[in-house]
Amino acid sequence: MPVSDNFTSTKKLAVFGNPIAQSKSPLIHQMFAKQFDMTISYERILGEPSTFVEQLGTFFADPNSVGANITMPFKEDAANWATEKSTGVTQANAANTLIRKEQGFRAETTDGKGLVSDLLRNGISLEGKQVLLIGAGGAARGAIEALLSEQPAHIYITNRSAVNAKRLVSIAEDARVTAVNESDCEKLAVDVIINATSLSLSGKVPAISDSIFDNKPAVYDMVYQDVDTCFIKKAKSLGCVKAIDGLGMLVGQAAESFYLWFGMRPDVEPVLEHFRNQLAKE
Ligand code: NDP
């Protein structure tokens, strides 16, 4: 249900997760709403694994509750709870956005679109490119459909657990997607590398040869920190000029959720700038 035509009552939104106190989503969406002179309520809700579905039911019992964001560990539960799902949600079996519809609730995943929009914003096109996707967890699964829609020549997936990389290949169901062992990455010449592992959070880099940077690919790390992540530091030290962290993906996926709820596209730039400045102060 596009709700942009009805501003008579404050629209309610929330993000569910556990933990949730760290979520930047309330502020991001309040900043988006301000761009359209809208008043919204957006709260953080600490989800409880045993009662998450009931919590969703309680939140959406209010007809002013137009949607929700879902984060770890409830993305799969949210996908199963919804009455309709996008292809990306079906592929990933995970949803980060719920949208109230005339009948029921639709589950979407906006992480992939957020990633692609941030790549494009940074001048990184995937069209005709050789792409290496490192990682095969929820973030990689949620991104694969959006990455393929940008018409890359090929996406190689590598991951610590090869079985998960192969599972993602079978989920993608596309001849342009193949799995490659970490040790075989040195044979690849790629144009774009996307790190979709959580390794940077613990100050580690994926176990792949430095030769993967020989081609001076554009590098994207889904993790963001106040300073360059270790993966970005490494890429830059090996001559990769374009090396970008995931803050823009975070704001981009939120912008996509906002669009799904309200049918209006917010400007990500001022919001991104705000959070970049905030991070620098932390
Ligand atoms: P998952 O837990 O689902 O997957 C984690 C991935 O990292 C798997 O591929 C896993 O490999 C790999 N990994 C974890 N530890 C190690 C290790 N010690 N050595 C090698 N590989 C490892 O997490 P998500 O996919 O949901 O998220 C991944 C990262 O992306 C997170 O850090 C998250 O913060 C970030 N992210 C950022 C977003 C943004 O908007 N910027 C949005 C979503 C996620 P294996 O399969 O072998 O376990």
Image (cartoon, helix red, strand yellow):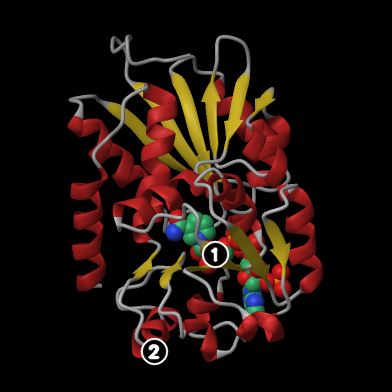
Secondary structure category for the residue under label 2: loop
Judge whether 172 appears above or below 200 on screen. above
Tag 2: residue type? Leu
**Who is closer to the viewer here, 35 or 166?**
166
Which residue is found at the position 49% from the left and 46% from the top?
A: 150
Which residue is found at the position 39% from the left and 89% from the top?
A: 238
Q: CA distance from mark 1 to mark 2?
A: 18 Å
Q: Is residue 93 visible?
A: no
Which residue is found at the position 69% from the left and 22% from the top?
A: 83
Tag 1: residue type? Val
Query: Residue 168, located in which quarter of the rendered image?
Result: bottom right
- The numbered mark, 1 or 2, whose residue comes first in the sequence reads 1
Which residue is found at the position 70% from the left and 86% from the top?
A: 183
Q: What's the mark number on residue 96?
A: none
In the rendered structure, are the residues bearing label 1 and label 2 in contact, judged by CB atoms less than 8 Å apart? Answer: no
Q: Give residue 167's position: percent from left, percent from top.
A: 79, 58
Task: From the viewer's perspective, tell me whether residue 87 is left or right of residue 29.
Answer: right
Residue tagged 2: 238
**Who is closer to the viewer here, 43 or 194?**
194
Query: Residue 165, located in which quarter of the rendered image?
Result: bottom right
Residue tagged 1: 131
Q: Give residue 261's position: percent from left, percent from top.
A: 42, 25
Q: Give residue 237's position: percent from left, percent from top.
A: 35, 90
Badge 2: residue crowd in 10 Å (few <14, some 14–19, many ≥20): some
Q: Give residue 103's position: percent from left, percent from top.
A: 62, 10
| Disc 1: residue Cβ within 8 A of ligand 1's nearest atom | no
Q: Is residue 130 visible?
A: yes
